[in-house]
Structure formats: C-alpha cells, structure tokens
Amino acid sequence: MSDAGSTHREVANRGLLVVSVMLATLMQALDTTIANVALPNMQGSLSATQDQVSWVLTSYIVAAAIATPATGWLASIMGRRRLLLIAIAGFTVASVLCGIATGIGEMVAFRLLQGLFGASLVPLSQSTLLDVYPREKHGAAMAMWGMGVMIGPILGPPLGGWLTDAYSWHWVFLINVPIGALALFGVAASLPTDETRASRFDWRGFSFLAIGIGALQLLLDRGEQQDWFSSMEIQIEAALAFLGFYLYVVHWMSSDRPFVNLGLFKDRNFFASNIFIFVLGVVLFATMALLPPYLQNLMNYPVITTGILLAPRGVGTLIAMMMVGRLLARGADARALAGIGMLLTAYSLWQMAHWGADVPAWLIIEAGVVQGLGLGLVFVPISTVAYSTLPMAARTEAAGIFSLMRNIGSSVGISIVMTLLARGTQINHAELAARIDPFAGSAAQLPAGWNLSSGTTLAMLNGEVTRQASAIAFLNDFWLMMLMTVAAIPLLLLLKPVKGRVVPAVVADH
C-alpha cells in the first residue's frame, strides 16, 4: 500500500495485473459492438420483431450508462479489488446467460445484467493502472489500457460476424467465458486488497442522475426509429433527461456528499479531456457504425471481407499507442501529440469523404490505417492528461465520469450519423431521380440494352439510384465528422502542459 503522499502503489506482480485488467477491458469493449452483426440471426432464433431485437443493444447501453457513475462510490465501500472481481465474474456469468437465452425477454434481461456488471470494468481498470504506475509512466500505462478500449470496438463487428457465420450467434457471448476466467484469476492473484471507507449512498442524487442518463440514452438510441421529436416517446424522454440533469445539478450544489462530484470539472485538464474523449467517442463509434453498411450494402462485400478491410484500422491504433507511450515517457508534449492525432484523424475522414460507390480496397485500408494512427495518438495523451492534476483518491470516480462521457459521445455520434444517413438517402434519391429524363431514350442516359418501358429495367435503375443516393449520404456524414474533428483542435489550448512530476491539485467538493 502506498503512503498518503504517494502517487502510486506497489504491487508484487504488476505484469500479471496489467494483462488481467487489459483482458477485462477488452471483454467489455468487445461487447459494445460484437452483438450488432448477430442481430438478424438472433431475431429469427428468438422469434422477435425488429423493434424487440433492438432492445438487445439498447438495454446494454442504458444499463451501463446508468451504472457507470456509481463506480466511485462502490469502490470506496467495497474496495477496488472486490468490486473488480465481482464485475468480471458477473459480466462473465451474464454472458453465459445471454448465450443460452431462449426468448427475447430473457435476452434483454441478461443484457441488462451484462451492462450493470460491465459498467465498472473500464473505469476500474483505468484507475488501477494509473495507481500502480508512477506518474512519469502514466503515458505507457494508458497506452496499454487504451489498446483494449480502442481495439475492442474495432474487432467487435468482424469477430461477431465470423462467429455467427462459422458457428452461431450464441458464441458472440460465450467467447467472453475464457477471457473472463483468465481476467478473474489474474486479478485475484495480482491485485492486493485496498482500504475501504463507510459512505452513505446518495439515493436522491443517484435517482436524478439515473433518470437523466437513462432518458438521454433511450432518446439517442431510439430517436431515429421513432422519427425523433414527432414521437411522444422521444418528447417524454427529452423532458425527463433535462429534468434529471437539472435536478441533479441543484442537488449537487446543496449536498455535502453528492453521488458524483461535479467539482472535478473545475480541474481544467480533466474538463478539457472530457470534451476530447466525447469527440473521440463520436468519431470512433460513428465511423464504426457507418463503415460495415458502406462496405456490405454498397460494395457488396461479405462480412469476413469487411472485417479484413477494417482490421488495418486496429493495426494503426496499436502502432500509435506503442509509439506515444514511449514519447510521453521521454517528456513529449501531450498537447502536440494529440494535435497531430486530431489532424491525422481529420485527414482520414477527408479521404473517406472523397470515396465513391466503387472505392478501391487499398484506399479503404489506407484511410483506416491513418485514422487508427490518429485515434491512438489522441486517446493516450488525453487519457494521461485527464488525471495529471487530480488527487489519487479521485481517480476512480473521475475514471467513471471519463468513461461515461466517451459512451455518451458514441451514442450521440451514432444517432446523428444514422439519422442523417437515412434522411440524406431519401433526399438524394429524390434529387437524382428527378434528373432522369424518361423521354431522352436509352442511348442518351442509360446503358445499352436498358429500356424504361421494361419493369426489370426500372427496378435496376431504381436500385442504382438508391445506391448512389446512399453513397452521397455516407460521404456527407464523413464530411460532418471531419469538420467536428477540426473544430475540436483549438480546444487543446485549454490543456495545461504537464512537465515532470506534478503535485496533485486539491479539487473542491463543489
């Protein structure tokens, strides 16, 4: 155990601990995207409607979002070791239950359990690594941790597709069993017991925050299906989200020990880092939501080929993280590295915005590698700087907030791009169809052998118009994310440079 003034704690087997918490992180990160490609198979097997099967994703997202802020309080009363062991074991057992579910009701309930147990895994693994490494090695620690967080969502769709095609959708969840078992035994053998302290649970604050976060996640996840604010459901969720967050802020200002300490945002580095991780969540998950349908629906690639084309993105991320950890340890400016990463990410999105409906495979791979490099260069410095001026005791709670902001960013990004994609496709289809002159003759505008008086030709023509309209909508989404990335770069000026061993600042309660 470390002294009160120390910035880290010594452990007997740090290597085993690092591998174990990385496995736990990877397991949770995989499950944010691995089930997406298996939904059609689940729908048929579980006899569910399209709306019912969508709750397989929604229940997990909402449960994880609501439970994430509770990580700090749970760790304080139970101890980080005990909470991490319970979270890993619970997540693994819930994964088994998902894998053997026989009905949609069971599946949604078990995914809810998965989200509740998995909510603590990412913030606990991050704060654990920060605590067992001295401050000058935090960059290397965050590079290792980031591999699980960033690679998991990238590997999820191709791995889920392969497991579903080669075996069945059940293995999308059962794959967590060996990973969870290794992580559980590794943490039990390497992480020492830590101190606990009695703390009253702030039920009022938790209720307000749970209502706000849960309603916001439901709004973002179901908005596109329900046609947004034309739906009474979405209007109610928006009102509940606003009311929940407003009441929590009022409660926080008047409470001695609030559920989540918003005073952490008074730390400039932590505040700015949360903005960046929000943007990073938007870009990472929105791109991951767009690329599979782009490659499969427009390019007609099978699932396995899509996974192969997306894999180099993960390779770029791994290379960047291995480089940036060493650069930070040698005193490189985290802001400069993050700035380079943002520029590379913006450039990759610019490349994607110039694709067409028949883009060559090598351009897809090139843009993926560049984006992977950029995201890796941003993620590690931002994750390191976020905690550089916070006291050690605040790290677990701060890690919960940090993970929550990334998750909300991913939900916002996916909701925006998928809504714009659907609406853009409709608008573009109408524009393109209006430019086809039915009286111009096949020789003027149509390929040889096509005849507008034929129903088959009309169907083929409509299919091609829809394909091109969808391609334009995809490209507009890439443009939007590029502009968002560029607009976030000046926010790097909010970050304070971190040099040497920084004395943790004392953060006010509120």
Image (cartoon, grey):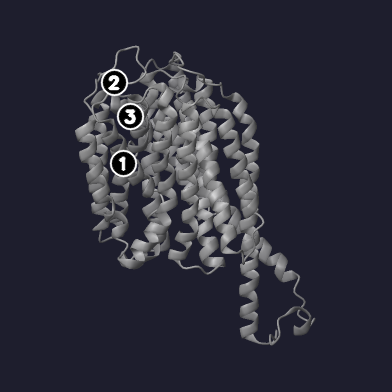
The x and y percentages for residue 392 are 37, 19
Label located before the other in sequence (1 or 3):
1
Q: Which residue is mark 2?
A: 200
- The residue depicted at 66 percent of the width and 43 percent of the height is 483
Q: Which residue is mark 3?
A: 128
Mark 1–mark 3 distance (CA, rounded to whole Å):
12 Å
Q: Which residue is mark 1?
A: 24
Mark 1–mark 2 distance (CA, rounded to whole Å):
29 Å
Which amino acid is tagged 3?
A: Thr
Q: Residues within 10 Å of mark 2 (few under 14, many from 20)?
A: few
Determine whether the residue tagged by mark 1 lies in a helix, strand or loop.
Answer: helix
419 versus 412 height, above or below:
below
Whether residue 159 sits left or right of residue 103 in the image: it is right
The x and y percentages for residue 393 are 35, 19
Q: Quadrant of residue 340?
A: top right
Which amino acid is tagged 2?
A: Arg
Whether residue 206 sits left or right of residue 77 in the image: it is right
Determine whether the residue tagged by mark 3 lies in a helix, strand or loop.
Answer: helix
Label located before the other in sequence (2 or 3):
3
The x and y percentages for residue 294 are 55, 61
